[in-house]
Amino acid sequence: MLPDPVVAAASFLQGSIPLLSLSAYLPQWKKIVETKSSRDISLRAWLLWSISAAIAVFYAVAQYQTTGQGTALVFSSTVNLIFVIITVYLLVIYRRQPAGS
């Protein structure tokens, strides 16, 4: 068993992942919106990321239901799935529009 301070630090770090992820997603979203184009970004890859993120949420919730622990993992996995869905939405919206309109 790990000491309580190590577990607390790990939970904090897991909970901080959404902020780190957001700092990575924001510039991508900004570029897509500003250029009004997503043609050079693989939609197939992002759809696979969405499946991966959904599986991560399923795993996190299953672990939480089984052990009663892992709130930070459920939170960070869910937020990541939301970010991936936002990205896929932007890719679809700006794929349909001609660039520059």
Image (cartoon, rainbow, N blue to C red):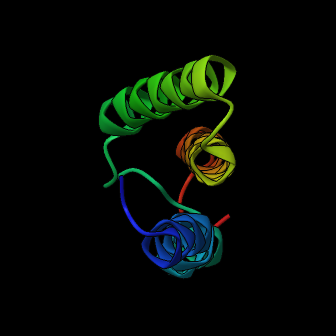
Task: Give 74 or 40, whichever is nearer the viewer.
Answer: 74
* Image location of residue 76, percent across then percent down: 60, 54
Where, quadrant-wise, is the C terminus in this rendering?
bottom right
Q: Quadrant of residue 30?
A: bottom right
> Which percent across, then down, holds residue 85?
63, 40
Q: Where residue 11 sits in the image (x, y, percent)?
A: 56, 65
How many numbered callouts?
Answer: 0
Residue 88 in the image: above or below residue 65: below
Residue 66 shows in the view: yes
Q: Residue at x 59, y 74 (%)?
A: 12
Front-lying residue, 12 or 86: 12
Residue at (37, 61) in percent of width and height: 2
In the rendered view, tell whether residue 58 sits above or below residue 64: above
Q: Is residue 68 left or right of residue 8?
A: right
- From this view, report whether residue 96 is shown above or below residue 75: above
Q: Is residue 38 left or right of residue 34?
A: left
Q: Is residue 28 visible?
A: no
Question: In terms of depth relative to the viewer, which is nearer, 26 or 11?
Answer: 11
Where residue 23 sits, quadrant-wise, is bottom right
For this rendering, which residue is in front, 84 or 30?
A: 84
Snapshot quadrant of residue 88: top right
Residue 17: percent from the left, percent from the top?
52, 68
| Residue at position x 31%, y 42% in the image | 42
- Does residue 57 appear to the left or right of 42 in the view shown? right
